[in-house]
Amino acid sequence: MKEKISITLSHEVLAGIDRIAGSKQSRSAFIESVLREHLRARERAARDARDLEIINRNARRLNRDAEDGLELQAPIGERPEE
């Protein structure tokens, strides 16, 4: 469901919207698509920040686990005996 609202924009912003949207898209449709994209980007950035915080909080353990796994691998160039 859509709601009708009123916003105030500078002449420069409105001219930019008209220039980019052209005659192919209404101002409302253009503004909605730009805002949706911006909201998705903000949500993605927040999720990435949470993920990075979790990784950083567990970095020592993750690095130890990775080193342990690497120690179990055969050195590069060596083939296991068959």
Image (cartoon, grey):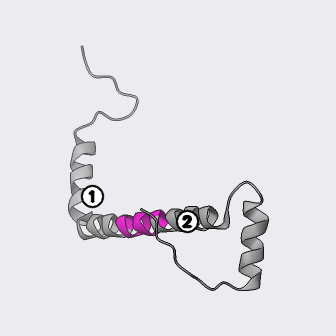
Query: Where the N terminus falls, by quadrant?
Result: bottom left
Magenta segment, prevailing SS (helix, strand or loop): helix
Rendered location of residue 26, percent (x, y): 67, 62
Give above or below for 7 relative to 24. Answer: below
When asked about the image quadrant of residue 61, the answer is bottom left
Rendered location of residue 37, percent (x, y): 53, 62
Residue at x 52% of width, y 78% of height: 5
When asked about the image quadrant of residue 50, the answer is bottom left
Q: Amino acid at mark 2?
A: Glu
Residue at x 72% of width, y 70% of height: 17
In the image, 45 versus 81, the foreground residue is 45
Q: Secondary structure at mark 1?
A: helix
When asked about the image quadrant of residue 48, the answer is bottom left
Q: Which residue is mark 2?
A: 32
Mark 2 vs 1, N-terminal side: 2
Q: Which residue is mark 1?
A: 63
Q: Residues within 10 Å of mark 1 (few under 14, many from 20)?
A: few
Mark 2 or mark 1: which is in front? Answer: 2
Horizontal side, residue 61 vs residue 29: left or right: left
